[in-house]
Amino acid sequence: MKVISSEIVMSAVSPKQYPEDGRPEIALAGRSNVGKSSTINTILNRRKLARVSSSPGKTRTINFYLINEEFYLVDLPGYGYAKVSKNEKATWGKMMETYLSSRKNLYEVVLLVDIRHEPTNDDKMMYDWIKHYGYGSIVVATKSDKISKGAYQKHFKVIREKLGMSPEDKIIPISSLKREGIDKLWGNLEDLFMA
Ligand code: GTP
Ligand code: MG
């Protein structure tokens, strides 16, 4: 994918604010701090388009990034952040449910997990939720610079087993730090539009 243009068009808190042009969307879901916003910047070759923070809970809204005026990448707010109030958790749940269940032009929801760790119970719940709505054919394993390449397969196995992934579902390692895995991820995202 040659990224010619990328811009944020909306930080939405309610469905009324979602873009209405019907362009296809690919959303990124995952725990707070897993690297969703970093991944968006990396694959778009932008340094500061999506805001990144070392403290979890940075992205609290559904952010729509328009790419090449053709489709959207959607940065979803992270979950599993301990310092969030009950009220905020409920708001998050409602926001996610509304988006996932009603979005007609949503092509795929990609789950991001940290390559180093076994997915959490929250990850498993999120994955089941994504699958329930018919998405989840791609899982991205972030921060791949943190382990050696020789250890990838072992970590993929742990991720596959915990999430209960089907053999045809893909895991793609990515490192925003080393800028690795970008072409492979784009290749798989492009395949979605062909299917
Ligand atoms: P929320 O917005 O809170 O849901 O988090 P997020 O998933 O958007 O994570 P974000 O992209 O803000 O990154 C969280 C932290 O992880 C930051 O300190 C990043 O610099 C770091 N990080 C992200 N990707 C990588 C990576 O590939 N390698 C390494 N080593 N660190 C990374
Ligand atoms: Mg973020």
Image (cartoon, rainbow, N blue to C red):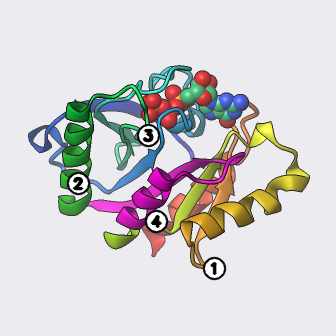
Q: Secondary structure at mark 4?
A: loop
Q: Is residue 190 visible?
A: yes
Residue type at numbered disc 1: Pro
Q: Quadrant of the C terminus?
A: bottom left
Is 44 covered by the magenta stretch? no
Q: CA distance from mark 3 to mark 2?
A: 16 Å
Q: Secondary structure at mark 1?
A: loop
Quarter of the image where one finds residue 63 = top left
Q: Which residue is mark 4?
A: 136
Q: Earlier in the sequence, mark 3 or mark 2?
A: 3
Q: Which residue is mark 2?
A: 97
**Which residue is at a point 41% across and 42% down the rendered structure image?**
67
Q: Which mark is residue 18?
A: none
Q: Nearer the viewer, mark 3 or mark 1?
A: 3
Up the image or down, 17 lies above or below 97; here it is: above
Left or right: 110 in relation to 170: left
Q: Which residue is mark 1?
A: 167
- Contact between labelled residues 2 and 1, with CB atoms less than 8 Å apart: no
Q: CA distance from mark 3 to mark 4?
A: 19 Å
Q: Measuring from the top left, give residue 16's x and y in whole percent.
A: 8, 41
Q: Which residues are magenta?
A: 105-130
Q: Earlier in the sequence, mark 1 or mark 2?
A: 2
**Which residue is at a point 60% across and 65% down the rendered structure image?**
162
Q: CA distance from mark 3 to mark 1?
A: 27 Å
